[in-house]
Image (cartoon, rainbow, N blue to C red):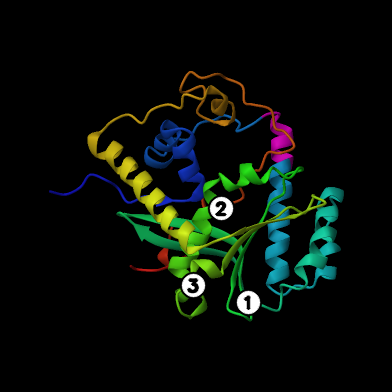
Amino acid sequence: MKSNIPTLHLSQSNLQDFKDCPRRFQLKVIDNISWPAAYLEPLSLLEKTTDLGNKFHHLCQQYFSGIDSGDLIHNISNPDLRDMWENFVPFANDLRDGNLFTEIILSTPMLGHHLIAKYDLVIKTSDDKFVIYDWKTSTKKPSRTQVIQRFQTFLYPYILVKTGNSLFKTDQPSPNDIDMIYWYPLSSDPEEIFPYSEILYSENADQLTKLIMEINNFIETGEVFPLTEDHSLCQKCIYRSLCERGIHGGELDLFTEIDQENLSGVHFDINNIIENKF
């Protein structure tokens, strides 16, 4: 009997949605419903913050593609963006000579779906270590405890273990040889390092298997995915009015991290994605 489960592309933001509120995941990922509501408010500040983050990521991509930092800074008129860039370049200068990929999409199959991630920067060092960098442009750096609970912190290393051999044309990376690093250009202590390991890799495989099996079960049984019991999460959800959980969005604060993993324009063309088959 043919399964009624569609093949889904599961990113860290989608998986975070399922963890935070299964109904949000259903509306966004399975039902593909667009809803005209702001993620957070005030909308003008949200747009400004999102635009700043997008521009910073684009500058980083250009820099690691070989464009001189001096040429790039001449085109920066926004003082906040200029401050971020001037903090970033001295740090990034030591990275540019490595074996690296910038703005690369990697994917690996799992239980009929595809785990997928867009990496800001992945480097293979001279001593055969692998480093994942992710640029975070929130005004204030969140606590390590907050960051380690995000799906991105373990999903990105997990996918790299599966796909690193195809990306770098080498043996499969050992989880013990991977670091996940968040870099906050507006922080006086910008770097937050999360070493990966065989133990974490095994735990993550179990966690992802359990979560995807739960998603598949909801789809197979035709159940409506449940709403979160934590109503505070509804304040930063575009579907809050659809679910009758309020009209206005929550307040954008200094610790808010706008998700820069924009996969909306990818269309999941396999020619644009490095993917392992097994």
| Res 202 quadrant in image | bottom left
- In the image, which disc is placed on residue 153? 2
User: Between disc 3 and disc 2, whose residue precedes?
Assistant: 2
In-front residue for pair 42/151: 151
Above or below for 193 versus 65: above
- In the image, which disc is placed on residue 173? 3
Q: Classify mark 1: helix, strand or loop.
A: loop
Mark 3 in CB contact with mark 2 (< 8 angstroms)? no
Which region is colored magenta? 41-48
Residue annotated with mark 1: 125
Q: Position of residue 7 (x, y in %)?
A: 32, 51
In-front residue for pair 185/125: 125
Identify the image quadrant of the C terminus.
Answer: bottom left
Separation (CA) of disc 3 from disc 2:
17 Å
Name which residue type carries label 2: Thr
Name the residue at 40% across, 55% down. Answer: 205
Question: Residue 209 lies in magenta, yes or no?
Answer: no
